Every structure is written in C-alpha cells, then in structure tokens.
Image (tube, rainbow, N blue to C red):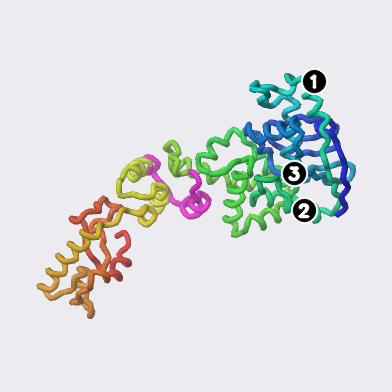
Amino acid sequence: MKTDLKHYTVSQVVEGFVYNELEGKGLFGLAGALVIQPEYQRNYIYNDGKKDVAVIDSLLKGYPLGLIYFNVEDDVLEVLDGQQRITSFGRFVTGKFAIQVDGKEQTFSSLSKDQQAKILETELDIYECDGSEVEIKQWFETINIVGVPLNDQELLNAIYSGPFVTAAKVEFSNSNNAYMQKWQSYIKGDPKRQGILAVALGWVASSQGKTVDAYLAAHRNDTAVVELKTYFTSVIDWVAGVFTRPPDKEMRGLEWGRLYEEYHGQSYNAATIDARIDELRAAPAVHVAKGVYEFVLSGETKPQLLDIRLFEDKDKRVAYDRQTKKARAAGESNCPLCALGTDNNKAKIYTLKEMDADHVTAWSKGGETKLSNLTMLCQTHNRAKGNR
C-alpha cells in the first residue's frame, strides 16, 4: 500500500459538510471530494458533549490532533481513520453544538474572528493511502481512535462492507428510528455502536445455523435487508405478544432469538402469562428475576432458571434426623422413594451427604421453601424427580 503525506486545513476538509441527523452514509468534505463516512465506517459517536468538545478545545489550544488517514478510491477520497474528529470539526463549524470559552457557552458563529480563523486555518497531517481493497480493509482493522476501539460488529461492517451492510445500518443503526425505543426495551446495545444490528444479525444467522460472518458473506452484495428485517420484527412482535405487560428491565438483553426458536410454536394466554410473571417477580424465594420469562415459556419445567432459595442447613438436618429415625423403626430406607421400591435400596439408610433437600409440593406449584414442605431424597431420586 502506497502512502502520501498531505496537509489540509480544517476549512478545506469541512467545505461542503452537511451533517446527516439520520446517521446514515452521506457525510462529505473537500467540496464533495471526500467521503467522511464510507459504508465500512462506524457511526458518529463523539456527540456526547465531551469528546466533541475536547476536539474543538484542542484546535483552539493548538494541541496536536494526531494523524488522519484517507483512502484513495479512484478520484474520490474516503476517511479511513479520523472520521470522528472530522465530523466534530464539521458539526461545530455548522453550529451543531457549543463549547465553553472563558466560562461562556459559545457556538462557532459567536466566537471571535481570531478564534474562528484559528480553527479553520489549523493544518491537519493526513496520509492518503492507495492500495487494494484487502489492504485497505486490513489497515482499517488495525487503526483505532485512541480510547474508542472498534467493537466486533464495527469490524464486521468493515470486512463485509457493501450494499447489504449499508442498508442494514440505515435500518438498525439509526437512533432516530421510530421503533428504536421499543427495540431497546428488549435489546441491550447502542445503535450508533452497531449494538442493535449485531443482535439482529445474530438472531437471523443462528436461526439458519450460521455464524454472523457467514451470513454477511452470503448477503454482502444484496441491496435490501428484507429477510433480516422480517425475522427481527417477527421475534420482537412475538415477545411483545406473549408478554403484553410494559417491558420489565430484566427483559432487556435476554436471548430472545433463541427463545423465539424454542417456544414460538406454542400458544400462550397473555393475561395468564402476565399474572404469573407478576407473581414470580414478587416471590421472595426467586433470586434471579430475569429467569422468570423463560421459566414461564417452558411451562415452568426449568426451576433452575430462578435460582430458588434453598432450604437452610438446620432444616435439612432436622428433616434428615426425623426421616432416618422413622425409617430405622420401620426397617426401610430413609429415602421415601427408595422405600417404595423393590430393589436392594428398599432398606438402605443414606448419610446426610448422600441426600438432597426437596420440596414435597414443587415450588413452581405453590410449595414453600420451609421445613413443613421439606423431604430428604437420595440424590439419584431427587435428580430424577425434576419438577413433578
């Protein structure tokens, strides 16, 4: 890959800059000769009132801003590294945010002419890189803005850049999408950092037994994301249809794609489901509230999801002594299930370590975790008994 060091002023770089509030592809500079946000680039993430302000403060104070890299693509330049800084320049110069100067909030237009000139005339050290697509993408993977490394999905977007990634980012990486609030009730992730897109791709790829890499490779040149959008919407609508309650905080980030594949073929009564969720969330014995949703979906066959409060050791000792005394007097096993059998364990007396505490009436069926509902079973029977 060939590189050529150039020097552009901030004024030159932001000429023709128009910030795209929808965060899609379309940021340009150098009077249209520079693509600031090529399709393999991450979305703008510096607009937090800190990083963007720090960039402008650095310009005013004459601090070095580090090298910037452009990719030479025919007669057009693309920002390879430096997108966040350049976008911050453009957004400030076009009045999108303000900074504090001498204790006063100032936009670009309210700065003194000297301060404006200092910003616009700052020279940037920029390497123009000319190489093959593979070389450029490999280089893009290795360079990161200090403190904000690329995450996995941002790297995948770079590796598999093309019309499919572009269309997918428009759909899932736009924080102004009307559905984003609903999606983020069930999904963890910042759309600007490709968090929603990563989940959507993970769901559809997993449903086909593929990795996300394989799915992106197969669809790289697709111009639409119909399958991806349809599957994602199907999962979200199914969750919202089964759990009609306002989304609980514990619902955010659950494996809804997997749960959809496992349970969407079953029918549920939404009112019954919601009432049971309320009951389980209020139960003091439930230690893991986020497990109640799959527990209910599974027909309450997986109590391990709830990390139910265990019987106390003193209660297990009382129950063991009581059962063992009764069993010795009757000449039978102190495991009540073994005592009902016909094999050699019918009269076996187990040690406390060989037995497990179990609910007489299953917890999921209303049985409480207290001594009056405790029975000691041999470990073999307890583990076979399950939730019956």
The mark lying in front, picked from 2 and 3, is 2
Q: Which residue is drawn at 48% across and 50% down?
A: 264
The mark lying in front, picked from 1 and 3, is 1
Report the Cα–Cα distance between label 1 and label 2: 39 Å
Residue 59 image point, x, y percent: 75, 32
Secondary structure of residue under mark 3 = loop
Residue 275 image point, x, y percent: 34, 41
In the figure, residue 167 lies in which quadrant? top right
Q: Residue at x 84, y 45 (%)?
A: 127
Closest to the observer, 29 or 7: 7
Which amino acid type is marked by label 2?
Trp
Quadrant (top left, top right, bottom left, bottom right) of the C terminus: bottom left
- The answer to which of marks 2 and 3 sits earlier in the sequence is 3
Q: Which mark is residue 113?
A: 1
Which residue is labeled 2 in the image?
139
Q: How crowded is mark 1: few (under 14 residues within 10 Å), some or many (20 or more)?
A: few
- Image: magenta residue range: 252-273
Secondary structure of residue under mark 2 = helix
Secondary structure of residue under mark 1 = helix
Report the Cα–Cα distance between label 1 and label 3: 36 Å
Report the Cα–Cα distance between label 2 and label 3: 16 Å
Residue 301 seen in this snapshot = no
Which amino acid type is marked by label 1?
Lys
Which amino acid type is marked by label 3?
Glu
- The answer to which of marks 1 and 2 sits earlier in the sequence is 1
Closest to the observer, 307 or 50: 50
Residue 92 shown left or right of residue 230 in the figure: right
Q: Indicate whether residue 256 is drawn in magenta.
A: yes
The mark lying in front, picked from 1 and 2, is 1
Which residue is labeled 3 in the image?
39
